[in-house]
Amino acid sequence: MERLWSRGLDGDVLRVGLKMRWRRRLVPSRRSRASGPTGTLRQLALAILVAGCLGCVPQPEDAVVVYSAADREYASPIFGAFQRRHPGTEVVPVFDVESTKTVGLVARIEAERDRPRCDVFWNNEIMHTLRLERQGLLQPIGWDIPSDWPADLRAADGSWVGFAMRARILLVNREVLTDPGAYPRSVLELADPKWKGRCAVAEPLAGTTATHFAVLDHVLGPEKAAELFAAIRANAVVLSGNKQVALAVSSGQVAWGLTDTDDGLIERDAGLPVEIVFPDQDPEGLGALRIPNTVCVIRGCPHPRAAAALANFLVSEDIEGRLALGPSGQIPARPGHPQRSRAQGEQEVRWMHVDFHPPAQRWPELAEQLRRLFRGS
């Protein structure tokens, strides 16, 4: 007998069998085995098997489409870093305008549910992500995060994760309000007549301001919240977005406004006369609200493997650290993260603790009320 050997795909030598000297007398010829109905069936079965195996081989994914409600100036460098770490995979971002970005992108995802174009949704807040979750539009994936990641910042089924939080702040122009003792201390002061026409807020129909109003509706109760919102509408200057609020404050058009830490930092970094005030810090106060970014993969998306890779990249320790130190000064969600947000610095802040699910569930009804109040339609 002779030993037969073959070389595998990875170069290893494999023993494949023994050759019998008297094989020709005992084994039918190759031609006779392949001929006739039985041989034809064998060939057909082999062809089906090969085709099936080829179908099981992962096809290359050279792109990942991300709908991003995060501002372009913050998100684009991160997408570039992902591309450098994953050569051959192009990130194709789709951004939307400041005033409608979250709602607009969510509407696109909903409209495309039967044929998704989006792979990853990077939302700059959480409430609308929860709405997509309830509609079954998100794909659970395996997340590379610690087991002690905050339970309120991850879906039980793995369909989304919250990370890199922004705080809702009062941005004050210190040249307009020269006495720090006169600074506003609570978001409720947006309704105080003493600030009529001197404070600003973004229209609460999209983005973090919509989330903030939904949380206030939940915490205060619908009746009390409705009174507050009506008073704010009559009292404050209403602008199209948080960025516009920050610009109005830094330019002195208003004395102060409700905005996000990232928009406040832009004005402070530009050397403009603004101060960041974390609101509602009294023991009986509401506490400052943190709103996380959220990231999720869309169910049935065109590039699921690249999507999962990008989603995990966004929640990594490196990216949270970059966002904490970067222009947006976001607050890491990762437990024990070594980097503090530069917006917070060493300051201790009392945070509001919120279950975002009830506000998200009530949002469609509340949105109609707010639309009638702020737009009259």
Image: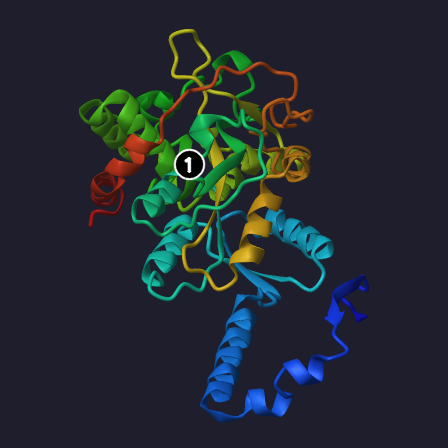
Residue closer to the observer: 337 or 167 = 337
Q: Is residue 46 above or below residue 32?
A: above
Instruction: Please name the residue shown 41% across and 60% down the image.
Output: 300
- Is residue 117 among the parts visible in the rendering? yes
Q: In the displayed image of the protein, which residue is found farthest to the top?
A: 283
| Badge 1: residue crowd in 10 Å (few <14, some 14–19, many ≥20) | some
- Is residue 257 among the parts visible in the rendering? no
Q: Is residue 260 left or right of residue 100?
A: right
Residue closer to the observer: 129 or 173 = 129
Q: Residue 127: which quarter of the image? A: top left
Q: Is residue 85 left or right of residue 167?
A: right
Residue closer to the observer: 260 or 177 = 260
Residue 8 locus on image (x, y percent): 76, 66
Residue 26 locus on image (x, y percent): 65, 81
Instruction: Please name the residue shown 38% across and 16% down the image.
Output: 286
Residue on which the image places disc 1:
155
Mark 1: secondary structure? loop
Q: Mark 1 belongs to which amino acid?
A: Ala
Residue closer to the observer: 130 or 185 = 130
Q: Residue 128: which quarter of the image? A: top left
Instruction: Please name the residue shown 62% across and 66% down the image.
Output: 62
Q: Is residue 219 above or below residue 310?
A: above
Residue 290 locus on image (x, y percent): 47, 28
Residue 169 locus on image (x, y percent): 49, 27
Q: Quadrant of the N terminus?
A: bottom right
